[in-house]
Amino acid sequence: MRDLTDDRIREHLGAYFQVPVPAEQDRVSSFDYCFNHFQAFRERGEAARLASPEVLELSCLHLGFYLASWGMMRGSSELLQRSLRHLVPVLEVIAATPDDLWTLDVPDYTPEAGARLLALEEQIRRALGGTREATQTLSMKVMLGVFGNVPAFDTNFCAGSGLRVLSARAVSDLRDFHTRHAGALAQSIYTRDFLTGAFTGRRYPQAKLLDMVFFLEGAAAVNSA
């Protein structure tokens, strides 16, 4: 895994929200609105209701728009040919996920936790059901937007970090990177509320901060190639 200086980490975290429109309207906040929806149910002890008849459609809409906003419904993707109903099995997995996996974050990445993350990723990928787009990138975008417990491992993240896939080794490398740079990553970044655009009291998890850092590091590498 590639290493970065603390200054480089702070530079990326500062640049992430420098967008051409107000942040609450930019796609960077698509994560916020999705994450807020799912986490609010979990915080009330109501995660099981996310797949209930009265909430299921809204949950699919939040997840679906976030995935579309973050590139998972581009022209060649099979998700583009599917309706929101395609996400119902994923919501059933989410609703049944143990509470401690919702709160797991990079500093807590033990070998046992890594094995459980891998098992959850496989469950979500299977729930997506055999489409060409049901790759680990897609399943991990789901995990990032809902639980915030892993980076997305998309093209830019992988280019920036030097990691390729979620694995026991990658989990260990991410934890070690965080340990080395905990000071630079000790920033309180909060999600935005959909209705007001104001900041909530819900912090970005460390996995999300690492996703942001290596996304921009990878984008810089790709653009300079």
Image: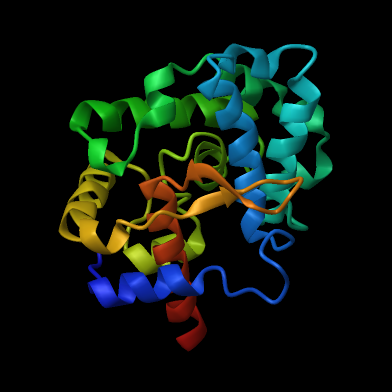
Query: 105 or 113: which is nearer to us?
Result: 105
Q: Name the spot of residue 73 as percent of width and height, x first.
A: 73, 51
Q: Name the spot of residue 205 as percent of width and height, x first.
A: 41, 45
Residue at point 23% right, 68% down? Answer: 3
- Above or below, comparing residue 146 to residue 77 in the picture: above
Q: Quadrant of residue 99?
A: top left
On the rendered structure, is 146 left or right of 50? left
Residue at point 73% right, 40% down? Answer: 64
On the rendered structure, is 129 left or right of 202? right
- Above or below, comparing residue 163 to residue 140 in the picture: below
Q: Quadrant of the N terminus?
A: bottom left
Query: 63 or 187: which is nearer to us?
Result: 187
Can residue 225 be seen in this snapshot? no
Residue at point 40% right, 54% down? Answer: 188
On the rendered structure, is 175 left or right of 54? left
Q: Name the spot of residue 201 as percent of width and height, x first.
A: 52, 42
- Above or below, comparing residue 213 to residue 47 in the picture: below
Can residue 220 be seen in this snapshot? yes
Mark count: 0
On the rendered structure, is 117 left or right of 27? left
Residue at point 39% right, 30% down? Answer: 103
- Above or below, comparing residue 120 to residue 47 in the picture: below
Q: Name the spot of residue 194 as percent of width and height, x first.
A: 72, 46
Query: 182 or 138: which is nearer to us?
Result: 182
**Colouring convention used in this rendered image of the protein:** rainbow
